Image (cartoon, rainbow, N blue to C red):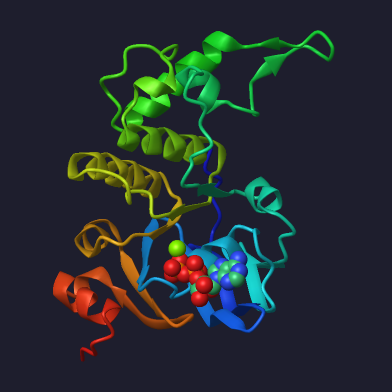
């Protein structure tokens, strides 16, 4: 599903600002996202991480600044519009329906059909197969059937389903806001695995994550936010876990 483009840099924010009344949530933020890259967004509560993500996915329109997607200046009017160009968000509530089967969830709202209205038929077997192939690629190897309901899955596995679905339908950029906040260590690993699979299939990934060690393990670049601004942007190999922790805590490191 991933369309190849010549430029590695696919998504760009330039000098973006967004306020809520008197509160400046993000100010003058510049960020570039490339293919095959995972960016970890870190920072204290209220630093502006979620707002930044919601500007990237079209939930908020910026007050100022520019958004460029594949080199073109764009203005998303809704998350739906951002999604239509390949910017997928995995939300905290995941938008999965627990009682429905894995494959119904995977294709929810985007079912493969044949024939013309009003005589359309779902291509269930094809969707079942695609679902299993994609979930296995995400490391969900213990699943026996695509007909099993989502509610048999653990929290980490559900995140992986959502990430897998975004990867299959999206193709360019994947945005995640604290995907592991409610998960155990083992479950967090499943999510990390899914993020890494998305990255290696060519997506640019932006993940908000409070666990610094985890960020350091899975991200190529770490962007530290403070009071709505980008305080530091560092490559993983140039910093240690404790240096990142210091940056988040606002202690300066050289
Ligand atoms: N919808 C909103 N209305 C008013 N203020 C908001 C809204 N969303 C976020 N803010 C404010 O913007 C700032 C940044 O919030 P947020 O982006 O949620 O930070 P983070 O995700 O880093 O914790 C905070 O001061 C927060 O209170
Ligand atoms: Mg937040």
Please report the residue visible at 19 percent of the width from the left and 45 percent of the height from the top.
Answer: 185
Residue 128 makes an appearance in the image:
yes
| Total number of numbered discs in the rendering | 0
When the figure is inspected, residue 225 is found, relative to residue 210, above or below; the finding is below
- Residue appearing at x 23%, y 75% in the figure: 244
Tell me where residue 54 appears, x and y as whole percent: 57, 61
Task: Locate residue 88, reporting x and y percent.
Answer: 55, 48
Q: Could you tell whether 204 is left or right of 28 in the image?
A: left
**Quadrant assignment, res 163:** top left
Q: Quadrant of the C terminus?
A: bottom left
| Position above or below: 185 against 35 | above
Tell me, yes or no, if residue 130 can be seen here: no
Q: Nearer the viewer, residue 235 or 232?
A: 232
In this image, 112 relative to 128: left or right?
Answer: right
Q: Residue at x 49, y 64 (%)?
A: 50
Say if 102 sits above or below 27 in the image.
above
Instruction: Please state which of residues 247 and 118 is positioned toward the viewer in this rendering.
Output: 247
In the image shown, does 155 or 132 lie closer to the viewer?
A: 155
Would you say 244 lies left or right of 108 here?
left
Quarter-wise, where is residue 123 in the image? top right
State the residue at coordinates (49%, 14%). Answer: 128
Q: Position of residue 72 (x, y in %)?
A: 68, 66
Quarter-wise, where is residue 35 in the image? bottom left
Q: Residue 108 at x, y = what percent?
A: 59, 27
Quadrant hosting ligand 2: bottom left
């Amino acid at each position: 599903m991933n369309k190849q483009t010549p430029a590695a840099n696919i998504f760009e924010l330039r000098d973006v600002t967004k306020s809520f009344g008197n509160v400046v949530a993000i100010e003058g933020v510049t960020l570039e996202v490339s293919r095959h890259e995972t960016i970890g967004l870190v920072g204290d509560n209220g630093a502006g991480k979620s707002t930044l993500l919601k500007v990237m996915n079209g939930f908020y329109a910026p007050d100022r600044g520019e958004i460029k997607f594949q080199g073109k200046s764009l203005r998303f009017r809704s998350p739906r519009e951002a999604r239509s160009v390949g910017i997928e968000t995995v939300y905290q509530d995941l938008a999965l329906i627990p009682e429905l089967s894995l494959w119904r969830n995977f294709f929810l709202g985007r079912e493969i059909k044949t024939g013309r209205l009003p005589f359309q038929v779902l291509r269930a077997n094809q969707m079942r197969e695609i679902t299993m192939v994609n979930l296995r690629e995400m490391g969900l190897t213990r699943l026996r059937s695509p007909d099993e309901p989502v509610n048999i899955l653990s929290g980490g596995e559900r995140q992986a389903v959502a990430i897998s679905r975004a990867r299959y339908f999206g193709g360019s950029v994947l945005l995640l806001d604290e995907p592991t906040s409610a998960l155990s260590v083992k479950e967090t690993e499943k999510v990390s695995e899914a993020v890494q699979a998305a990255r290696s299939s060519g997506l640019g990934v932006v993940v908000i994550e409070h666990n610094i060690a985890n960020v350091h393990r899975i991200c190529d670049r770490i962007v530290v936010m403070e009071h709505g601004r980008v305080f530091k942007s560092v490559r993983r190999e140039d910093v240690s876990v404790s240096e990142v922790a210091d940056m988040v805590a606002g202690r300066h490191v050289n």
